[in-house]
Image (tube, rainbow, N blue to C red):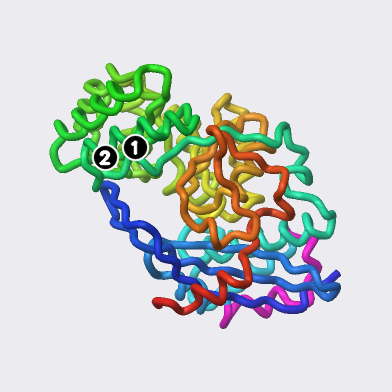
Amino acid sequence: MKIKSAETYLLNIPVSEIKDSQYTVDSINLLVLKLTTDNGIEGYGFNWNTSYGMDIPQLMFDKYLKNVLVNEDPFMRLKIHNKLSSVNNFGWDPRLGSGVEIYIFSMVDMALWDIFCKYSDLPLYKVLGSKTDKVEAYNTHGGWLSWSVHKLTENAIELKKQGYKSIKIKVGSENNDDDYYRIKSVREAIGNDIRIMIDANTKWDLETAIKMSKRLSEFDIYWLEEPLNPLDIRSHSILREKTDIPIALGESLTNKYQFRDYIINKAVDIIQVDSTKVKGITEWLNIANLADDFGINVYPHTNIQQPLHTQLVASIKNGMMVEHVPWLLDVWKYPVEPENGFFYLNKIRGAGTEVRDDAIEKYINSKQ
Ligand SMILES: [Mg+2]
């Protein structure tokens, strides 16, 4: 089998406006890759950013990398990775494991896995030899920093009614007392039988993180996510010594060496590797298995990629929960949405990366 063509589509999809300590988001900029083989199989990959920016990897791919894929055997993923790595027009180097090229590697790797799954006529989680077809969900769409305390608590109560056992609340307010009051209010509203995770989106410095983790620990916090600058492994290690709350991170890391260094420096408790931030499914599996070697569990960062990440979590020994945000449900061909706090995977075919034709038509070039 050979790859016959590679096409990209740039979509802009409006979402309900939300805010954390770093960003305001009102749309998802989604770059879709479709590889078509000479026997008619279509493999989909994607990558994304909030609001804008994916025209840059699209330009790089269409102009300089697309032709590398044509006539290659899609089952020889490593050969294709090596060929892409050897293209070096601007001094960018995928071996450095960061930058725009990672977006491209990720979507190509996904599309190659999608072809393999479709050729096998199986969902990815069965190709990978899954442990389950049911994955626990946790809900992030309830903890945005822009929401009032009243809205936050009312929503947390509603999520509990819907069957969620875990919810995530954003922290990193301008005033630390506000964070304390928000978490206290939610804990009092929902009781002690629901897990609460908190996410600072890298906002705090070490002193603030130590102080706030001590103050908030009375609310039985399941994890503290991205408290500090993600490049500062040493400070995470110091923080971890000074708090009982497990430290979670990974959405800002882009290669396996960064994860390795966090792990061997005892600076992290929970790995949140995201297949769209590292080199796709292949690298995601490598990092998840590395974490397992050190007894660390994986809860992948997941804003939009639930159809893929639920399958990946189901397929690794140390995969735990997948994050739910109700975005792009009308974009994926095989969307997944939690029922009573769980994702069910049995209707998915392929890698879960395929986009609906009518979604491409609806959202293409809607705002670039
Ligand atoms: Mg986060």
Q: Is residue 20 above or below residue 87?
A: above
**Which residues are the magenta region?**
62-77
Q: Residue furthest bottom?
A: 63
Expressed as whole percent of the image width and height from the top left, the position of residue 364 reads: 50, 76
Identity, as a three-letter code, of the amino acid under mark 2: Lys
86 w.r.t. 5: above or below:
above
Observer-nearest residue: 267 or 23? 23
Residue in the image at 65% along x and 40% along y? 344
Rendered-image quarter of ligand 1: top left
Q: Amino acid at mark 1?
A: Asn
Q: Are marks 2 and 1 in contact (CB under 8 Å)?
A: yes
Which residue is label 2 attached to?
151
Q: Quadrant of residue 108?
A: bottom right
Per the model, the C-alpha gap separating discs 2 and 1 is: 6 Å
Q: Is residue 127 left or right of residue 322?
A: right
Please give the label number shown on residue 155: 1
Which residue is pictured at 29% across the width and 55% down the height?
23
Relative vertical location of residue 287 with respect to residue 166 in this rendering, above or below? below
Q: Secondary structure at mark 2?
A: helix
Which secondary structure, mark 1?
A: helix
